[in-house]
Image: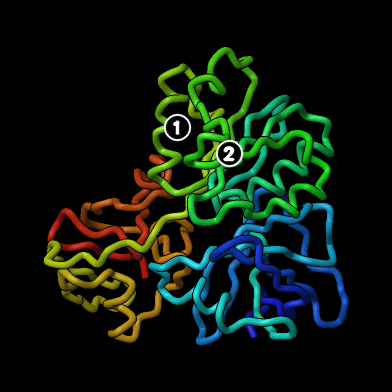
Amino acid sequence: MDETLREVIVAKKSEEAHNMASFELVDPTGAELPTFSAGAHVDVTLPGGLVRQYSLCNSATERHRYVIGVWNDANSRGGSKALHTQVNVGDKLQVGLPRNRFRVPRQTKRAILMARGIGVTPILSIADHLKRQDIPFDLHYVYAMMSPGSFSEMIATSNFAENTKFYFEASELNQLLNPVTLLQDQPEETQLFICGVDWWQDPIIHLAEQKGWAKERIHVERFTAKVPPAVLDKVFEVKIASTGAVYKVPGDKTVTAFLEEQGIKIPTSCEQGMCGTCKIQVIEGEADHRDKRLSDQEKAEGFFLACVSRAKSDLLVLNL
């Protein structure tokens, strides 16, 4: 087994709301699990070999367990559906070492946390961290329309319950989230942490930028629906630098999927251009970047994410 993978057992499976469940994962022998920082996620290997990423929503001070929250997405590519329907208490899974792209900066002095639906999962560990550090913050949590009450018990028994305000997406009996009010007149050192589906969080991020929030103060984690296949997209060639072999990538296949068919396996995880697992350097040619992960510097250095990005030029020479 890969040394970076670790076997865990499902100690508890809880229904958090309609189509939302949490899973408590522990070492089968009772040993401590690798440490993680608030906002981190792990790769989980599911039945059938699928690998998907899930945020850790428990306190980063805990070493005896990992807790993940999973939304049973109707458009699932198999990951969330497998966890909801096939994985039960006592089953064994494999997890990778925790990674963090949603880290709390050390200089954080105060914060606003916003989340919708399953997007609250990384926010929960961040809220716990801020509370333990006595850093002032408020958590504004919007229930997804079809999943009211999600993670409410987990929040109610947490150390940050008093910092949390709940919202419904539509209700005459409930005050709706008003980002304009929440984002205005905030001290310059305030950090914004936000997580949810793109159509919900992108307007809030844009609003924050309009109100003068520097990009360095806006921290975003994304959960994105399945990327549609690139049907009738540009056909281009890729050349493997180490062998000189050239392959023509059709318009309805991603680089990773097509090369795997040719026996060239590029590691993938999210398959949505978010995690960076499939990052490859382009030695020659111009990439058509379609990811939501790479920095401008990484793109300038020639990297692209092969699970979603394609080519503007007719040929890409890959450092493989």
Q: Which secondary structure lies at badge 2?
A: strand
Q: Position of residue 137 (x, y in %)?
A: 71, 29
Q: Residue at x 33, y 72 (%)?
A: 256
Q: Residue at x 71, y 49 (%)?
A: 125
> Tell me, what colour scheme is on the image?
rainbow
- Earlier-in-chain disc, 1 versus 2: 2
Label number found at residue 167:
2
The quadrant where residue 89 appears: bottom right
Q: Which residue is drawn at 21% across and 65% down?
A: 230
Q: Position of residue 63 (x, y in %)?
A: 84, 62
In the rendered view, does 233 fall on the left or right side of 72?
A: left
Q: Is residue 86 above or below residue 160?
A: below
Hey, what amino acid is under mark 1?
Ile
The residue nearer to you, when weighing 157 against 225, is 157
The quadrant where residue 260 appears: bottom left
Label number found at residue 282:
none
Name the outermost residue toward the front.
172
Q: Is residue 89 above or below residue 222?
A: below
Graded by Cα atoms within 10 Å as few (under 14), some (14 to 19) or many (20 or more), the crowding at tag 2 reads some
